[in-house]
Amino acid sequence: MSIHQFSLNSQPEITPFAISPKLSEQIERLLLEVLQFAHDGQMKVVPSGGLTKASMLQLARRHDPKERLQGVTREEQWPALHCVRVLAVGAGLLRVGSAAVLRPTREALAWLQFDPSIRTQHLFSGWLTSDWDELTHLEGMRILPRPSDAIHRAKQAIQQILAQVPDDTWVGIEPFIVQVQAVSPGFFRQDRLSAHWSIRDKLNLPLDGDDHWAAVEGVWLRLVVCSTLHWLGMVDIGIDDLQHPIAFRLTALGSAILKGAHLPVADPP
């Protein structure tokens, strides 16, 4: 599917009230802890691939020995951890070994030696090829039958769309979503097979058909930008005075990864 060229110059200027705190350092720290525990053979998984409650408790109690993870029984209920584990598997940093124990790969040892920008690039590549999709894992939607190939194609389309966003520019999230709908409405439901999908929200209400584009594709675009890419440090998120996300801006790292440009390298300590 070709992604139409579009310009955001006609948007009114967005001036956020504040910038949401960066989370990329916390996300990488969480991944490093998962790799360490995996190296020690302490990360057991359930048949679906998620970490067991006991393994999640070990991670949580590294920071608070009294942590009980009240109300958390599945990895999906700890979204940042769930994202980190799935992206790491997708990037080839983790694999499930014998006895259902998560283990670091040889690639993980090399990854640890890379510059932080290259590490993020690998995780973004892991997102592109993984089965992590924000609609299911963050929004609680169910799409049947599971359209893994369509999800991978849609992620590539999102990358192409975001690569057209100008640098050093605050882009309104809602106007951006509206513009994507106008120029590339079929970036997710691209083929005839999608007409047979059953899409349900977390309340089991149907979201089939183009009438629900904003509730499916629109929500996905928002989640990719405000969650996954923000967690990876590829975008800044601008918020209003009520702490609601209203705009995003590509970071230098995000712009380089999305546009295939030279990656910024951190200064040596």
Image (spheres, rainbow, N blue to C red):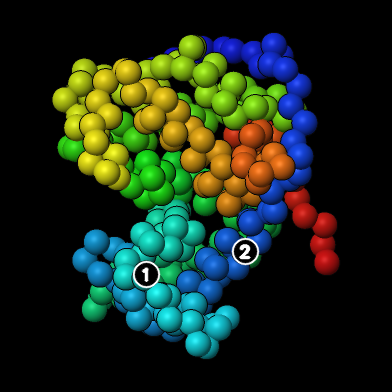
In this picture, residue 40 sits left or right of residue 13: left
Q: Position of residue 7 (x, y in %)?
A: 64, 13
Q: Is residue 190 visible?
A: no
Q: Is residue 144 visible?
A: yes
N-terminal of the pair, mark 1 or mark 2, is 2
Instruction: Find residue 52 and report its image quarter.
Output: bottom left
Q: Nearer the viewer, residue 48 or 178?
A: 178
Which element type, helix, strand or loop, lies under badge 2? helix
At horizontal 46% and vertical 67% (from top left) the residue drawn is: 106
Which element type, helix, strand or loop, lies under badge 1? loop
In this picture, residue 15 sits left or right of residue 233: right
Answer above or below: position of 3 versus 138. Answer: above
Answer above or below: position of 109 versus 200. Answer: below
Give the foreground label among 1 and 2. Answer: 1
Instruction: Give the residue at mark 2.
Output: 26
| Contact flag, marks 1 and 2 (Cβ < 8 Å) | no
At horizontal 29% and vertical 39% (from top left) the residue drawn is: 201
Q: Quadrant of the C terminus?
A: bottom right
Instruction: Give the residue at mark 1.
Output: 72
Q: Nearer the viewer, residue 144 or 200?
A: 200
Q: Position of residue 111 (x, y in %)?
A: 56, 61
Callout 2 amino acid: Gln
At horizontal 72% and vertical 17% (from top left) the residue drawn is: 12
**Label 1: few (<14), some (14–19) or many (≥20) C-alpha neighbours in 10 Å:** few
Instruction: Report the Cα–Cα distance between label 1 and label 2.
Output: 20 Å
